[in-house]
Amino acid sequence: MEAMVKKYQQKFRKVKEEMGRWKELQSRLISQFTSASAIIQRLQVLQDSKKYGALECVQGIQDAVLAKQMESLQIILLSMNKTLEDFRGVSSSLEKLVRDGKQLVKGGSAIATAKQQQQRVGVKPNVADCLEGLRLLSEMHHSEYLLKFSLVSALAKVALKPSANDDLSALQQLLVDQPNIPSEEVQGIFDVIFAEEIC
């Protein structure tokens, strides 16, 4: 069982790498979302011809400015979709680690019984802890990916609303908070898995 636990710990090191990638993607998505929100707020102002002042006499200025802003918004939305694809890649990678973890128990040279999965060697985690930790981390990130997908979809709809400022702020706060990944719970899982390294 000790050798199997070490294999699981290697899987958790891979999980840490994926979570590092997730953190980078989170920063990128927040930046993209902020840029898109700024354009959406600007669009509301630019649609009012009175805001152009002396430029109002320039033929087609309002349409040209609006078209340029819409083009910029479209480019940002496309890049957000690419970022979402990268999030999905991390989520899929975590799901694969769960499947591989289950295969370790079923497949290896010695199939672990339920009782053996509960056995603990010193301060090392047991196999059941490892499997549950992998499952939880995968579930958290998959749920968060689905939320991010919904938020980006909602952003496009909010862009068409006449007064979107409150909605944009609420969506951005939800994006920043990552409610499906409680950091203390994640840290607790890693503390259990790498207990002997902490001691």
Image (spheres, grey):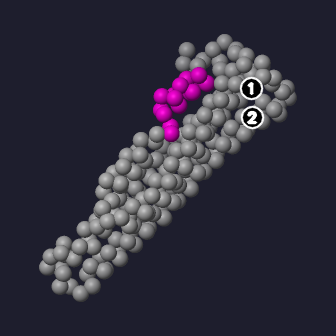
Checking the image for residue 183, the label placed there is: none
Q: Residues within 10 Å of mark 1 (few under 14, many from 20)?
A: some
Seen in the image, is 160 located left or right of residue 147? Answer: left
Q: Quadrant of the N terminus?
A: top right
Q: Quadrant of the C terminus?
A: top right
Local secondary structure at mark 1:
helix
**Residue 27 locus on image (x, y percent):** 43, 48
Which residue in the structure is indicated by mark 2?
102
Instruction: Write the residue at 71% across / 24% down.
Output: 127
The total of numbered circles placed on residues is: 2
**Please, is residue 166 above or below residue 39 in the view?**
above
Instruction: Write the residue at 63% across / 42% down.
Output: 94
Instruction: Write the residue at 73% across / 38% down.
Output: 100
Which residue in the structure is indicated by mark 1?
4
Q: Front-most of 174 and 94?
A: 174
Q: Front-most of 78 and 171?
A: 171
Q: Front-most of 48 and 182?
A: 48
Residue furthest to the bottom? 59
Q: Which mark sits nearer the N-terminus, 2 or 1?
A: 1
The stretch in magenta equals 180-194
Can residue 39 be seen? no
Q: Residues within 10 Å of mark 2 (few under 14, many from 20)?
A: some
**Residue 51 locus on image (x, y percent):** 19, 72
Magenta includes 72?
A: no
Local secondary structure at mark 2:
helix
Instruction: Write the residue at 48% across / 34% down.
Output: 182
Seen in the image, is 111 located left or right of residue 183? Answer: right
Disc 1 residue type (three-letter): Met
**Residue 137 locus on image (x, y percent):** 59, 36
Can residue 50 be seen? yes
